Amino acid sequence: MDTNMLQLYAVTDSQWLKEGQTLAEAVEAAIKGGVTMVQLREKHLDDEAFIALAKDVKKVTDVYHIPFLINDNINVCQACDADGVHVGQEDMAAAKAREILGKDKIIGVTAKTVEQAQEAVRQGADYLGSGAMFGSSTKSEAKPMTMEEFSKIRQAVDIPIVLIGGIDAANIRELTGSGAQGAAIVSGIFAKEDIEGAARELKQLSLEVFPPEVKD
């Protein structure tokens, strides 16, 4: 996969939507600001509502040619023909997701330990999500990960990694030199009054912190 698509990875959360705003509108604002990938994470919806929302958001990501992933749910991924899924440790195994979705879809896996990271690689993951680097406003149980802990994961595997967990414009520079390919951000984008402006600021910072890979 093109690792540059992970540079500024937006993860949705509808709880931050402003009155009268749709999630598709919020995602479009984030993309205009420079987001390079979008993951739809809406844990409170049943499949029917999740699929309807996914189709709405995918119309936007398609226009801007931004990769679109679904959190956890293979059925929704297939129903809207998303570009792939991201699965956690309690969700479907990456190997099973690969078997169902085929070789062309993107599969990301949450990995918080070296063992989880290596197993995800064995099962065919395209990239890993590691954290929580600064805690999390969306997952109260998320345990912060130190840079030392992340460094062990980074050295153990050779696939791209995106960092997640409480990352925003105020702390993203602390991830400089981590060896990760990007940051996955929820409230640092979608909780902001000016989503496009917040994404634009983060994009500028992410270019410094996660220098793009130059293609031959």
Image: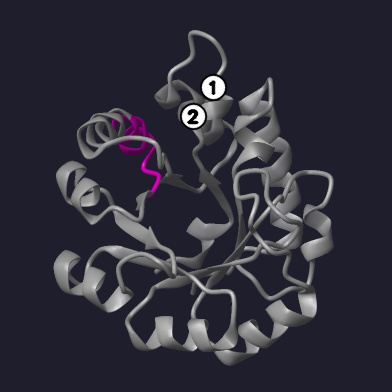
- Percent across and percent down for residue 81 are 19, 47
The furthest residue to the top: 20
Relative to residue 75, is residue 111 drawn left or right?
Answer: right
Work out which quarter of the rendered image holds the N terminus and state it.
bottom left
Specify the label residue 161 is tagged with.
none
Q: Residues within 10 Å of mark 1 (few under 14, many from 20)?
A: some
- Percent across and percent down for residue 151 are 71, 82
Q: Which residue is located at x 49 percent, y 29 percent?
A: 14
Specify the label residue 17 is tagged with.
1
Name the kind of residue labelled 1 in the image: Leu
Q: Which region shows up in magenta?
A: 57-67
Name the kind of residue labelled 2 in the image: Ser
- Percent across and percent down for residue 103 are 21, 72
Q: Residues within 10 Å of mark 2 (few under 14, many from 20)?
A: some
Q: Which residue is mark 2?
A: 14
Dominant secondary-structure state across the stretch colored magenta = helix
* Residue closest to the eye, 205 or 82: 82
Q: Which of the 4 image quarters holds residue 57?
A: top left
Q: Does residue 83 sit above or below 128 in this rendering? A: above
* Residue closest to the eye, 84 or 95: 95
Q: Is residue 151 magenta?
A: no
Q: Which residue is located at x 62 percent, y 27 percent?
A: 196
Relative to residue 183, is residue 209 drawn left or right?
Answer: right
Relative to residue 47, is residue 155 drawn left or right?
Answer: right
Q: Which of the 4 image quarters holds residue 63?
A: top left
- Percent across and percent down for residue 35 are 55, 43
Q: Which residue is located at x 45 percent, y 21 percent?
A: 25
Q: Does residue 174 sit above or below 31 in this rendering? A: below
Q: Secondary structure at mark 2?
A: helix
